Image (tube, rainbow, N blue to C red):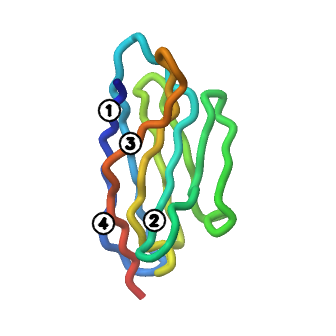
Amino acid sequence: QVQLVESGGGLVQAGGSLRLSCAASTSSMFSINAMGWYRQAPGKQRELVAAITSGSNTNYGDSVKGRFTISRDNAKNTVYLQMNSLIPEDTAVYYCNVRARGSYLLDYWGQGTQVTVSS
């Protein structure tokens, strides 16, 4: 099993910054591949924010390019999302995603953390 614990959400004014963290705990039977963040705003579909492979290749959603930075600490099985120049449209529940291989390659999700950007 893979368990994910997210932290760092909250309320911030437009133009501000937040940093999200997601720590994955797993047994030695699992290897973690890609890690990433998705978000879902009310009435909208969940969308990719950013993802990072085990080799640190990154991919960003178009709406956050140049403002958000994803990184990971493989020794800690932790992924971070630094969010700068936040805008009200960034308001959403942010979900950590980890792709890990045990017997199978599966996606695991965090419980979600609320990010609210006020104008």
Q: Nearer the viewer, mark 4 or mark 1?
A: 1
The CA span between labels 4 and 2 is: 15 Å
Please name the residue shown 51% across and 78% down the image. Answer: 89
Per the model, the C-alpha gap separating discs 4 and 1 is: 22 Å
Residue at the farthest top position: 29
| Three-letter code, disc 3 | Cys
| Relative depth, front residue between 54 and 41 | 41
Q: Residue at x 65, y 60 (%)?
A: 61
Which residue is the site of mark 2? 40
Structural distance between the alpha carbons of marks 3 and 4: 15 Å
Query: Percent from the top left, x then y, of residue 118?
Result: 38, 83
Secondary element under disc 2, as helix, strand or loop, is strand
Q: Looking at this view, name the residue that lies furthest to the front.
A: 104
Residue neighbourhood size for the residue with mark 1, other residues' Cα within 10 Å, grouped as few (<14), some (14–19), many (≥20): some
Query: The disc labelled 2 sits on which kind of residue?
Result: Gln
Q: CA distance from mark 1 to mark 2?
A: 20 Å
Q: Secondary structure at mark 3?
A: strand
Disc number at residue 3?
1
